[in-house]
Image (cartoon, rainbow, N blue to C red):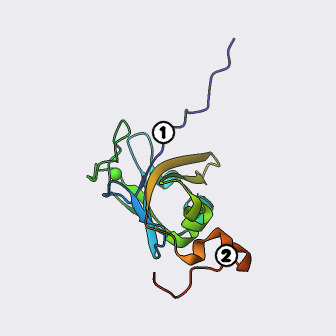
């Protein structure tokens, strides 16, 4: 006799970087915050997610709130910008930390960013979306100068 399965299949968890924007372009020298939404649906309540466990390419969440900003969209589109009645978990990340984590200066034009985290019940999950990098890296991102110390983005604009 087969045991009754008691594990719920994990629903697809959809990530929308820069909800409302398409493409998700990010300047390689951007500062400030990167908005990211985990999209709730009939199958997925974003309040099941433990926000303290979330990281985008290893960068921790700066702050979060629950708000319905976007609806999942099937088939590789850039996510709709509408809302759908399901709350989304809206996250803010420090853009330079994320860019540093993916070594944006040496990255391809399009980069997939992965959010990792856990539900309150301990289930681990990940979700990804793609950004498009724009612009030329400043000197501070240059690998040749990396030996002089990977300084945090300083007080200099372009
Ligand atoms: Ca929503």
The answer to whether one can see residue 156 in this image is yes
Secondary element under disc 2, as helix, strand or loop, is: helix
Q: Is mark 1 within 8 Å of ligand 1?
A: no
* Residue 41, picture quadrant: top left
Give x and y (percent) for residue 40: 40, 49
Q: Is residue 22 left or right of residue 89?
A: left
The residue sitting at 65% across, 80% down in the picture is 151
Query: In front of the other: label 1 or label 2?
Result: 2
Q: Earlier in the sequence, mark 1 or mark 2?
A: 1
Residue at the disc numbered 1: 12
Residue 78, image x and y in percent? 34, 47
Seen in the image, is 91 located left or right of residue 77? right
CB atoms of marks 1 and 2 within 8 Å: no
Q: Quadrant of residue 20?
A: bottom left
Q: Which image quadrant: the N terminus?
A: top right
Residue 35 occupies quadrant: bottom left
Number of marks drawn: 2
Image quarter hosting the C terminus:
bottom left
Q: Residue furthest bottom?
A: 155
Which residue is label 2 attached to? 145
143 or 15, which lies in front?
Answer: 143
| Residue at position x 48%, y 44% in the image | 13
Residue 82, given in percent of the width and then of the height, sits at 26, 52
| Label 2 Cα crowd, 10 Å radius (few <14 / some 14-19 / many 20+) | few
Measured along the vertical axis of the image, is residue 149 above or below residue 117?
A: below
């Amino acid at each position: 006799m087969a045991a009754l399965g008691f594990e719920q299949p994990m629903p697809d968890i959809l990530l929308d970087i820069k909800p409302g924007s398409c493409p998700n372009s990010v300047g390689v020298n951007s500062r400030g915050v990167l908005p990211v939404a985990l999209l709730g649906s009939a199958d997925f309540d974003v309040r099941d997610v433990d926000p303290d466990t979330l990281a985008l390419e290893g960068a921790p969440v700066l702050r979060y709130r629950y708000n319905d900003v976007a609806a999942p969209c099937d088939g590789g589109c850039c996510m709709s910008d509408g809302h759908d009645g399901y709350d989304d978990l809206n996250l803010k990340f420090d853009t330079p930390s994320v860019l540093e984590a993916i070594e944006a200066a040496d990255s391809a034009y399009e980069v997939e960013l992965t959010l990792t985290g856990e539900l309150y019940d301990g289930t681990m999950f990940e979700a990804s979306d793609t950004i498009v990098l724009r612009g030329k890296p400043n000197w501070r991102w240059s690998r040749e100068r990396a030996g002089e110390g990977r300084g945090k983005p300083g007080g200099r604009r372009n």
